[in-house]
Image: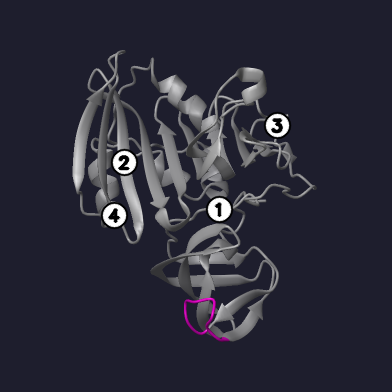
Amino acid sequence: MGIFFLPVTSIFLLFLLGLNCSLVTDKITLAPEESEIKTLLPRYSEFIVERENPIEYFFQRFGVKKETENLKKDNFGLVLKTAKGKFRSLDFEVTLFIRENKINSTNIRFTFLPSKKRKDIDINYYFKHYGEANFCYEFSSAYSPILNHVPEKWGYFYCGREISFNAINRDIREVCWDVKNKYQVDDCRDTAYFNFVNQREFLPTARNACPHKCYEFIPYIDLGVYIIRKPGVNLRKEPDVSSGIILKLLLNEEVEVIEDTGKIGEIDENVAPWVKIKTKNGFGYVFGAFLKKPKEFWN
């Protein structure tokens, strides 16, 4: 089904190669429907803003000390400026794609080394495209090696959950990727989507059937109100799976995150920090992948 299609975030990078877009430093004024995008994609409104120096902004935003910075120019005149550092226990890097001294797009990358998983956030300023995608380190091919004669190799391939906003189609799409039979596929589950033009929504009924379970990689969690996205989530005394259980939380129960502990863990393929929350019955700790913002598009 999906082995012949490029992921949405890869399409973003193809667009930027030929773009010459003007850089503005003022905050984008959101159209009415873009206010709804902010609700469905909580990180969108912060990341889509064009800034004079995205590297400095994101390194300051996440409190990361810059360890290296380098420039690379390709044969087509595109300049890649990359800075690297360490965010908590994660490798962190920001890459700017620049043509004629104008930033066309930005990539923010977090890597969890214990299981070699990666989270990429891609922003194309010209088209206002935005995408978040997860990657796994596997022996695979991006396409069917039989049909496309692309040899398998070790590397990072799309797997887990990908969520994106396409500003041309005016829709949000959520895709589940995985590596199966030595090639990358997106047929683990039907694509979920919401279109702002006609207000059409499709939510798949068949659940994920691939090894990585449409996992999510959440590098950080902002403070604020969230809901529990799975039934029977354990509220624990300490930020650890071996800690005592205070009680079990209900599906869609509203809680308040009051602290991101910064302790990154992995449960059932998901990578996320442990957070301290306030509930109607008191305080405790939960694994961050079991939370989502109210009305966030996550199926």
| Furthest-right residue in this view | 205
Q: CA distance from mark 4 to mark 2?
A: 11 Å
Q: CA distance from mark 1 to mark 2?
A: 20 Å
Sequence-wise first label, 1 or 3: 3
Sequence-wise first label, 4 or 3: 4
The residue labelled by disc 3 is 198
Q: In what element is the residue under mark 1?
A: loop
Q: Are marks 1 and 3 in contact (CB under 8 Å)?
A: no
The quadrant where residue 36 appears: top right
Q: Which-is-in-front pick, marks 4 and 3?
A: 4
The residue labelled by disc 4 is 86
Sequence-wise first label, 2 or 3: 2
Magenta stretch contains residue 242: yes
The residue labelled by disc 1 is 216
Q: Is residue 242 above or below residue 171?
A: below
| Dominant secondary structure (helix, strand or loop) of the stretch shown in magenta | loop
The residue labelled by disc 2 is 94
Amino acid at dot 4: Lys
Q: In what element is the residue under mark 4?
A: strand
Sequence-wise first label, 1 or 4: 4
Q: Which-is-in-front pick, marks 2 and 3?
A: 2
Q: In what element is the residue under mark 3?
A: loop
Q: CA distance from mark 4 to mark 3?
A: 43 Å
Q: Position of residue 153 (x, y in %)?
A: 50, 33
Residue 141 appears in the picture as rendered = yes
- Please name the residue shown 27% across and 15% down the image: 77
